[in-house]
Image (cartoon, rainbow, N blue to C red):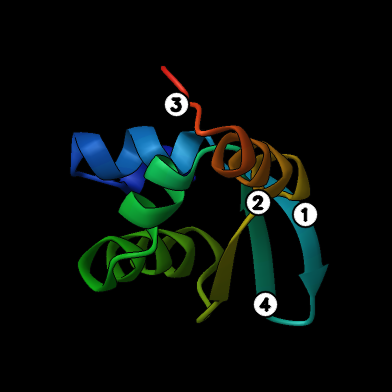
Amino acid sequence: RILEQIATPSIRQSFKTGVLSSLEKKTVSFEFQSKFHLEKANTTPAKAEIEKAFAHVFKSKIKLEFRLSETAKLVDATLEVFGGELIE
C-alpha cells in the first residue's frame, strides 16, 4: 500500500530496493544494498514523498532512516582497495 502512494516512478523504484532493518516507536529504518538507490531515496524531495506515503497509510507521522547495508559498505571498501568498479 505504501508503494501505491509514491507517485514518482524513480523514487518508488529506489525505495523498493530498501529492506526494513528496524522499527522503534515511530522511526522506521531501511537498509539499501546499493549506494545509488540509497542516495536517490535519501534526497529531501524523495524522502518527503516516501514519508507522506507512510503518513497516508498509517495515519500518523513516521520518521524514516535510510542507511547503506554493511555488505554494501564492504563491497565499496573492497572496490576502493583494488581499484575496481561495480557494474549494476
- Residue type pointed to by label 1: Ser
Q: Please, is residue 45 above or below residue 63 in the view? A: above
> Mark 1 against mark 3, which lies toward the viewer?
3
Q: Which mark is residue 85?
A: 3
Residue 51 location, quadrant: bottom left
The mark nearer the N terminus, 2 or 1, is: 1
The mark nearer the N terminus, 4 or 1, is: 1
Q: Residues within 10 Å of mark 4 (few under 14, many from 20)?
A: few
**x%, y% of residue 80?**
55, 43
Q: Closer to the camera, 58 or 33?
A: 33
Marks 4 & 1, CB-CB < 8 Å contact: no
Please name the residue that numbered disc 2 is placed on.
31
CA separation in Å, label 4 and label 1 = 11 Å
What residue lies at 65% left-to-right and 51% top-to-bottom? Answer: 31
* Residue sticking out furthest to the front: 82
Marks 2 & 1, CB-CB < 8 Å contact: yes
Please name the residue that numbered disc 1 is placed on.
21
Is 51 on the left-hand or right-hand side of 71?
Answer: left
CA separation in Å, label 3 and label 2 = 21 Å
Please name the residue that numbered disc 4 is placed on.
27
- Residue type pointed to by label 2: Glu
The mark nearer the N terminus, 1 or 3, is: 1
In which quadrant will I find the C terminus? top left
CA separation in Å, label 1 and label 3 = 27 Å
Say what secondary structure mark 2 lies in: strand
> Mark 4 against mark 2, which lies toward the viewer?
2
* Residue sticking out furthest to the top: 87
- Residue type pointed to by label 4: Thr
